[in-house]
Amino acid sequence: MNIWADTVALSRMQFALTAIFHMLWPVLTTGMGIYLVIVEGLWLKTRNSDYYYHARFWAKLYVLNFGIGVATGLPMEFQFGTNWAPFSEAVGDFFGSILGFEAAMAFMLEAGFLGIMLFGWERVNPKIHYFATIMVAFGANLSTFWILAANSWLQTPAGGEVVNGKFIVDDYFQAILNPFMFISVSHMFFATLETSLFVIGGISAWYILNHRHAEFFSRSLKIVVAVAIAVTPLQIYIGHLSAEQVAHYQPTKLAAMEAKWETSPAGQPADWSLVALPNNKLERNDWEISIPNGLGYILEFKKNLSEPVLGLKEWQPDDRPKMVGLVYYSFRLMSGIGFFLAGLMGVSVIQWLRGKFAPEAIAQQKWLLRTWLLAAPLGYIAVESGWIVRCVGRQPWVVYGQIRTADGVSNLPASEVLTSLLIFAGVYTTLFICAMFFGSRIIRQGPNLELSVPGIENQPAVETEPAEFIPDQRPVEAQQ
């Protein structure tokens, strides 16, 4: 099959491109919003101006991501009408309203208070400003709730039934609170927070490695590690709960995640595949390294192995995911990164307890700082990999078990879809270059420690700092 002449394949590729690129930006804003609430709250509690400068600096990166996120999110909404019109007509009464809730409730709330958060530092009462910051963070995470509620409904449709090709809602709240919703929202919440923490930690490590404001950014690194102590293990646990849900509600996806072709009967634990080379054509793995009985005990331990673990051959080829290798390795990449970040957090805690995070010692931990710098983009990769597992593993269904993906695509000439796909690729490449340029410029400039601090603005900024937190303002070359 020539995918470049296949409207379904091209429409899927276009939506994948726009979704993967768009996801890069709200992932950081939703998690960084919580970080901004933390540092501004610490400033209000302690009146330590160091926290104030942190809030001002990281807010610049927040607004950059917010702007790109808005610009790339709108085309995704339009695609439901242009490329996926039959799907929109079939489920629009519910799915469309949920997306409307996201725009009207979450996005407008975040956008409405964003101006106060960015420009209201010396114009409103500090407590009012803090309330605005909380509302921005709440709006960003409320957006996550509605998007995940809508997507979870695609995974486990509930609250109605399809009648004459159209989904009729019987119970609106049951549809929103579908079986996947709670775990999915929790998993994505911690994913965005974890990604943001390691981005902030990686940037902080870069400053320390380059001997720029080392004492200042050692504080942000400590905050990140303190929060990550709870976030990283929780994310792994919630990810396991999500996999258990997949095993119960979407056994075809589980089989693809594990490249499992043959069924393991009840009472016989299934092997856990570590690395394999799936062969879709021959319906087997060309080679595989596995742990005997591992998967069965992971998934069925509480059930005393009372249920079989189904293999892909239990379904007809048209009723199961075709891109098994992509799903299989995306799942392992996501899981591996999760454990790596948890391990990095554990090592960092040990070093902190050993006194290696003290201002005079932290710059000497070059191996640890370089690992944090390496970890900065890994959260993005894990999130994108997770969404690949979630959406590609759902195929061939756009609404699982109800509406096939091929039936939800608009009847458009393949050439037109290819043209729009190439335009999106060009525009998004330009946006990415611009985002990297402005983001790197913000980071190169560093924090402005000469800003007046509300309440003590008549004093020079450097006099409000404890002596040990006065940054070295010389050029990098002179410092070295």
Image (tube, rainbow, N blue to C red):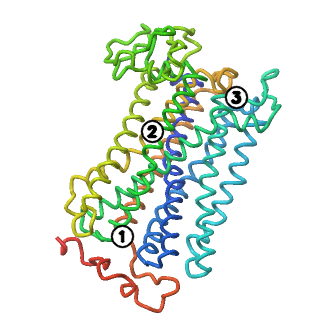
Callout 3: SS: loop
The residue nearer to you, when weighing 230 against 255, is: 230
The image quarter in which residue 109 lies: bottom right
Viewer-side residue, 449 vs 191: 191
Mark 2 in CB contact with mark 3 (< 8 angstroms): no
Q: Residue at x 67, y 54 (%)?
A: 106
Image coordinates of residue 451 in percent, x first then y, are 44, 81
Mark 1 or 3: in front is 3
Question: For mark 1, does the 10 Å Cα neighbourhood hold few (<14), some (14 to 19), or many (20 or more) residues?
Answer: few
Report the residue at 25% width, 53% height from top. Answer: 368
Residue of label 2: 236
Do labels 1 and 3 touch, CB within 8 Å?
no
Task: Work out whether mark 1 precedes mark 3 in sequence or the reverse, and give the earlier one.
Answer: 3
Q: Residue furthest left?
A: 480
At x 63% / y 46%, what residue is drawn?
145
Q: Residue at x 67, y 37 (%)?
A: 80
* Residue type marked 3: Pro
Q: Which of the marked residues, 2 or 3, is nearer the chain's N terminus?
A: 3
Label 1, label 3: how many angstroms apart (C-alpha)?
A: 49 Å
Q: Secondary structure at mark 1?
A: helix
Check residue 157 in the rendering and tell me which mark sits there, or answer none. Answer: 3
Dividing the picture into quarters, in which one does residue 418 lie? Answer: top right
